[in-house]
Image (tube, rainbow, N blue to C red):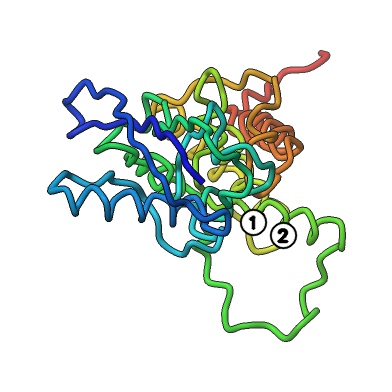
């Protein structure tokens, strides 16, 4: 396959950046998208040019590192697929492919296609964990969990924190990510102890990082490679409302009918 690549090149966070055009003439349809970038970088290094910087780790659709905006879609044209799981047979000979980094104020570009997603880490640090001492591992089924709750928690836990939801949202909202983490723990017995503080702290941190508000268009769910459901956002909103009410001071009066 012969392809034309238009790739965003940016030296550092202060550089304005621009698109660079490259030609690849021997791309195998069986290559993954990242393997195609490996070939491009080998050619660039061979010419004495700076290779394209991009994030990658497991290349198995688990780590969430391969954050590329491909032809106007987060992770490319396939639904429920990360960039590393995308293969070149999904493109045609002679295609022009435009590749950009995530575009969000809370995800500043560090270099080329690499963005700083540490905002997600700070949201998790604000409360996305269970800190109470739960003791040693329990025997299977020792703590009864309704199947519906267990399935919903497992589905929410599938979020890999790639940031596609933020990249797809016109307001760069992190609601789907935060809600998946909040829902996952709120549904399980071990997470209920801290559920009130958790949702308040994580939402506060999410706002502090500069993420936008939810647009209610569903673009986050549509582009999520793990098909995280919008129902998690509804769960987070309920958790937040209940937590806000429970934190209100009690002004219970002492008076009554005399």
Q: Tell me the CA gap for discs 2 and 1.
A: 5 Å
41 horizontally vs 90: left or right: left
Q: Is residue 88 above or below residue 105?
A: below
| Residue 178 in view here | no
Residue at image x 69%, y 34%?
Answer: 222
Label 2 Cα neighbours within 10 Å, binned few <14 / some 14-19 / many ≥20: some
Farthest top residue in view: 258
Give me the disc on residue 157.
Answer: 1
**Image position, residue 77 (x, y; %):** 63, 37
At horizontal 54% and vertical 45% (from top left) the residue drawn is 198
Q: Which image quarter holds the C terminus?
A: top right
Nearer to the camera, 21 or 217: 21
Residue at the image point whose x is 41% and y is 45% from the top:
25
Corner quadrant of residue 175:
top right
Among the 4 quarters of the image, the one containing residue 193: bottom right
Q: Nearer the viewer, residue 216 or 83?
A: 83
* SS under mark 1: helix
Answer above or below: position of 255 versus 219. above
Q: Is residue 83 visible in the rendered structure shown here? A: yes
Out of 195 and 88, give the one closest to the viewer.
Answer: 88
Q: Are marks 2 and 1 in contact (CB under 8 Å)?
A: yes
The image's mark for residue 154 is 2
Q: Residue at x 21, y 20 (%)?
A: 16
């Amino acid at each position: 396959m012969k392809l034309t690549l238009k790739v965003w090149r940016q030296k550092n966070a202060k550089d304005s950046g621009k698109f660079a055009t490259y030609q690849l003439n021997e791309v195998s349809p069986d290559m993954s998208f990242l393997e195609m970038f490996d070939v491009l970088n080998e050619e660039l290094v061979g010419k004495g040019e700076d290779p394209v910087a991009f994030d990658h780790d497991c290349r198995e659709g688990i780590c969430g590192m391969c954050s590329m905006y491909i032809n106007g879609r987060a992770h490319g044209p396939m639904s429920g697929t990360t960039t590393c799981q995308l293969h070149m047979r999904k493109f045609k000979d002679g295609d022009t492919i435009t590749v950009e980094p995530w575009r969000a104020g809370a995800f500043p570009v560090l270099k080329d296609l690499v963005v700083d997603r540490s905002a997600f880490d700070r949201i998790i640090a604000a409360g996305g964990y269970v800190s109470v001492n739960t003791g040693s591992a329990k025997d299977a089924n020792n703590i009864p969990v309704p199947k519906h709750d267990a399935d919903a928690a497992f589905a929410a836990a599938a979020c890999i924190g790639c940031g596609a939801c933020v990249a797809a949202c016109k307001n760069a909202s992190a609601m789907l990510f935060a809600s998946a983490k909040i829902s996952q723990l709120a549904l399980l017995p071990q997470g209920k102890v801290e559920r009130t503080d958790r949702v308040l702290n994580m939402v506060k941190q999410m706002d502090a990082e500069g993420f936008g508000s939810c647009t209610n268009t569903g673009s986050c769910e549509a582009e999520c490679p793990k098909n995280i459901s919008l129902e998690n956002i509804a769960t987070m909103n309920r958790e937040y409302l209940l937590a806000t009410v429970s934190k209100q001071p009690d002004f219970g009066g002492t008076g009554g009918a005399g």
